[in-house]
Structures are given as C-alpha cells and as structure tokens.
C-alpha cells in the first residue's frame, strides 16, 4: 500500500465531534503534499414529499439545508486553520452515503470516517455498509475513550496486522499480504512498531461440553501454521515478541491483544460479503469492529 496522498474524509453532522477530520489533519501534518477531500452529507425527507410540498417548495427546502451546511463547513475549515491548497470541500445531498462513496471514491487512496457502533438485525449501520462496499481502504477512527490502558499510552502508535490462517489458498494469502503491507505502511507513518495477531478459533460449545481441550487445540493449530505464518511475515521483520497467537473468538481475542499491547490501530482484511447472509453472520472485520478498543483500518482483496 502506498502512502495515502488523496484522502476522502466523511464528516459527521455538526453536533458531533469531528474525529475523522482530526485524523486527516494528523496525516496532513506528516505528509504536506496530501490532499483532503472533505464531504458533508445532508438529506431531509421534507424535500422528497411530493404529496405535501410542490416542486418549488421542495427545491427551496433543499437549497436552504445545503446552504446552511455549506456555511457550517466553511466555518469549520476556517476554525481548523486548513489551507485551501490542501483541501477541497463539498456538500452532498443523498440518503445513500455508502452508495455515493462506492461510486465517487475511485481516485482516493483512503477513506476516513469516525466510527458509530449501533446495530440491529433490520438496520445495518453505515460503518458496516462501508466495510463491505468502500473501494479504497477504510479507516474508522474515534470512540475509544475509557477503553485503553493508560500505562500503554506510549505504544499508541503501534499497529496490529490481523492475519487469517484458516485457509492457505492464494486468495487468503493475497489478502493477508495486503493487510501486512498496509499495517507496515501505517506503522511507518505513525512512527510505531508493527505487530501481527493470528487468532486460533475454536468452538466454545465443544469446550463447555468438555469435548475439546482449548489449550491442546491452540498448541496443535500454532504448530500446524507456524511455518506458513513465518513465511508471510518474514519480509516485515516482526519480532517474535510482537507475534500473537491467542485462542478464542476473533473479536474478543483481537480486542484483548490491543489492550495487551496498547496499539492504536488494527488492520484487518474484509471479504466484503453482502446480502442477508452478511447481515446475519457478519465477517471478521465486523466482529473486530464491534469490540475493538482502537482505530480500525479495513482493506479488501
């Protein structure tokens, strides 16, 4: 992964803290040649109610909502002290943010958005939709107050690459290498160390029924995959003390590794599964997002 120089920043509504913009500014401070495309999304049902408002009224409503957001956006840029040479701003009218990003981000190296963790069976939050559909790598930031170990603050620039060793086929190997490459690049950008975690997953039901021994399962899995993992990470010079092989549920174990190391960023690959099966089952990226106590970078095959 190359150093991101064209960054699409999805801004929150004015009432929220702009965590994505804070992260984008930090990136800009380290790479002054980067360009930030700041996008604020607006939409209101009133402007679409043809049975209540005529065309002129609907246009007026939409125009005023957009104008108000543009004023806020210009004030935000001024207050943040951002240079017009390094940014572009736009207000977009749509209620399909993930669809807009999918169609309008091909020239971006990175998409940054603040994270919002709410989910019901019938509603897929925007974060989850973007994990599945964003063409560029997606960096989800913020929302971690009170979840980090203070004594590990000095390691907050460290980056953890999440490796999936359940399959050793070409597709999974390629995705694992993309994860490692992105993690190594962000460790370099942040000035931190690179870790990797490969979770050994097992059935807790079978463990509870005493049909398997989790310690034995972990030992056997680590032994069986150690050569393959070593070959994957060899080009990245990751010390043995920064290679983590916990056993359990992937979301829980990655979160535990973050707390153990104090790392500030986890990088994970997503197969971008879609449809009802994705909503019901999710994927590893979504399970990690649900419990992650730090920022999350998602890359696709």
Image: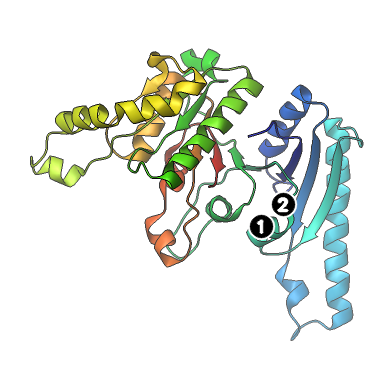
Within 10 Å of the Cα at label 1, are there few (<14), some (14-19), or many (20+) other Cα atoms?
some
The picture places residue 195, in percent across and down from the top left corner, at 46, 22
**Image position of 265 with respect to 108: above or below:** above
The quarter holding residue 19 reads top right
The picture places residue 11, in percent across and down from the top left corner, at 72, 46
The picture places residue 66, in percent across and down from the top left corner, at 84, 60
| Residue 293 visible somewhere in the drawing | yes
Residue that label 1 marks: 102
Q: Is residue 237 left or right of residue 20?
A: left
Front residue of this view, candidates 198 and 49: 198
**Image position of 2 with respect to 193: above or below:** below
**Image position of 116 with respect to 273: above or below:** above
Residue at screen point 80% across, 81% down: 53
Within 10 Å of the Cα at label 2, are there few (<14), some (14-19), or many (20+) other Cα atoms?
some
| Tag 2–tag 1 contact (CB < 8 Å) | yes
Residue at screen point 46% across, 57% down: 273
Q: Secondary structure at mark 1?
A: helix
The picture places residue 103, in percent across and down from the top left corner, at 70, 60
Q: Is residue 163 left or right of residue 263?
A: left
The quarter holding residue 210 reads top left
User: Which numbered marker is on residue 105?
Assistant: 2
Residue at screen point 43% across, 59% down: 278
**Image position of 205 with respect to 151: above or below:** below
Q: Secondary structure at mark 2?
A: loop
Q: How many marks?
A: 2
Label 2, label 1: how many angstroms apart (C-alpha)? 6 Å
């Amino acid at each position: 992964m190359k150093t991101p120089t064209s960054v699409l920043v999805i801004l929150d509504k004015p009432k929220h803290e702009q965590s994505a913009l804070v992260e984008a500014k930090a990136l800009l401070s380290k790479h002054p040649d980067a360009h930030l495309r700041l996008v604020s999304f607006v939409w209101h049902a009133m402007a679409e109610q043809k049975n209540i408002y005529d065309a002129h009224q609907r246009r007026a409503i939409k125009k005023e909502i957009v104008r108000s957001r543009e004023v806020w956006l210009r004030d935000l840029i001024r207050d943040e002290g951002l240079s017009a040479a390094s940014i572009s701003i736009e207000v977009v009218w749509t209620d399909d943010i993930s669809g807009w990003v999918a169609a309008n981000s091909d020239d971006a190296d990175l998409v940054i958005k603040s994270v919002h963790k709410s989910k019901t069976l019938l509603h897929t939050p925007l974060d989850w939709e973007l994990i599945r559909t964003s063409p560029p790598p997606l960096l989800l930031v913020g929302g971690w107050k009170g979840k980090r170990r203070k004594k590990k603050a000095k390691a907050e620039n460290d980056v953890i690459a999440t490796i999936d060793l359940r399959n050793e086929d070409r597709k999974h190997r390629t995705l694992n290498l993309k994860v490692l490459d992105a993690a190594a690049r962000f460790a370099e950008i942040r000035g931190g160390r690179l870790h990797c975690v490969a979770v050994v997953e097992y059935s807790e039901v079978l463990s509870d029924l005493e049909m398997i021994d989790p310690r034995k399962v972990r030992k056997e899995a680590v032994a069986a995959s150690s050569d393959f993992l070593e070959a994957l990470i060899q080009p990245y010079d990751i010390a043995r003390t920064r290679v983590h092989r916990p056993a359990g549920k992937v979301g829980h174990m990655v979160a535990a590794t973050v707390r153990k190391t104090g790392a500030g960023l986890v990088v994970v690959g997503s197969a971008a599964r879609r449809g009802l099966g994705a909503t019901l089952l999710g994927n590893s990226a979504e399970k990690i997002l649900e419990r992650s106590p730090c920022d999350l970078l998602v890359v696709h095959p």
